[in-house]
Amino acid sequence: MLTGRRYLLALTDEQAVYAEQVGAICRAVWNTALEQRREYRRRGAFISYVEQARQMAEAKRDPACQWLADAPSHCLQQTLRDLDKACRTHGTWRVRWRSRTRTAPSFRFPDPGQITVRRLNRRWGEARLPKFGPVRFRWTRAIGGAIRNATVSRDGGRWYISFCVEDGVVEPAPNGRRPVGVDRGVAVAVATSDGDLHDRTFATAGEVARLKRLQQRLSRSLRVHGRHRRSKRRDAVRAQLGRLHTRIRARRTDFAAQTAVRLVRDHGLVVVEDLRVQNMTASAKGTADRPGRNVRQKAGLNRAILDKGWGGFLLALEHAARYHGATVVKVNPAFTSQTCNACRHVARESRESQAVFRCVACGHQAHADVNAARNILAAGLAVTGRGDLAAGRSVKRQPPERLAA
């Protein structure tokens, strides 16, 4: 199976400067190619990756575009391939621009024949990349397979290299262990139908206070407007914020990976809600004609949802399930938090608080998230029993039992 290996790079000063330059060139190629695709769509035409790659090769011979030749050619071609895939998947008008300040530089080397990796000693390894030469990285684990490609990216002021590896592991057969329902919440990150609650504080009280101070300093620092000079103080504050967010994000990723492995190792079927996190965390500001309501409350809810990392947890769950013979099923999330698992009565009033569920019909009381997880499990068992994919309403029905004559 294909998997990833991520290592911390130890670039020299010259290599770090060159990596920034290559990232800037790839960003310019992405934005230019995206604008070209949008212009073609405005005219009712279409341009493919092959044509854009041909035009880029011609542009390299133009004296005004000599800077394109400074970056590895395969990285530029891969940027166009990524753009083509994004436009085909999401549509040309939904693909976003890559900003110099908001988008971290990243570029990929797609040809494994041009990537050579060797271990130097117990702590260090070395990778040879086109136009970079040998770059050192911290050897924290073995590569464990054949390298397919390599991606260099910057995160929180540090450079990393990620290898896509074919590890040779065959996907195991279903393990047949008991199923479990999983509810992703705001107060508790993960609650299971077995009654287990998994949660962790990703930012300490001191880090939260420091985040607030840095954001205040960022708002007071000089912004870049037109021909005004760049503010070194603002860049320094942004770098501090980036490092702090990277630390918090690493804890969230670690929590998601450990919890996902624990679930798929002990259960053969994991049922989760099919949540549209992007839609759920959309802003409630509205427009000038139709202003939104409860904007501050909705903003707080959005921050709480994003802090728990619902999307990252689901991604880690699906990745870990491949190695442990487990199946991940998504079900419709409608009324799972308002339904009593004991009598199946649906009432909004039964959810007394974020943590307490007391059925108004039968008086059944339980932890609200655990009750929801049991409803999710019941829905998952129902749809898997009918053999569908749990996407929406089931169309198949189990045959009724034959009546005795």
Image: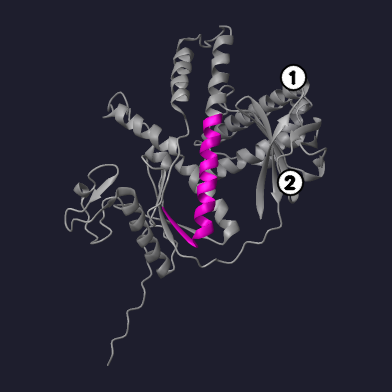
Residue 93 is situated, as x and y percent measured from the top left of the image, at: 50, 35
In the depicted structure, whether residue 128 falls above or below residue 174: above
Can residue 128 be seen here?
Answer: yes
Give the mark nearer the N terminus: 1 vs 2: 1
Is 183 situated above or below 38?
below
User: Label 1, on which residue?
Assistant: 64
Label 2 Cα crowd, 10 Å radius (few <14 / some 14-19 / many 20+):
few
Q: Is residue 126 above or below residue 326?
A: above
Q: In this rendering, does residue 43 appear at all? A: no
Residue shown at the point (59%, 22%) measured from the top left: 100
Q: Position of residue 384 (x, y in %)?
A: 42, 66
Q: How is the image coloured?
A: one colour
- The residue lying furthest to the top in this view is 228
Q: Which residues are magenta?
A: 247-272
What residue do we see at 46% from left, 40% from top?
A: 309
Q: Position of residue 378 (x, y in %)?
A: 35, 62
Residue that appears at 20% across and 53% down:
359
Q: Is residue 61 magenta?
A: no
- According to the picture, the residue beneath numbered tag 2 turns out to be 142
Amino acid type shown at disc 1: Ala
Q: Is residue 210 left or right of residue 339?
A: right
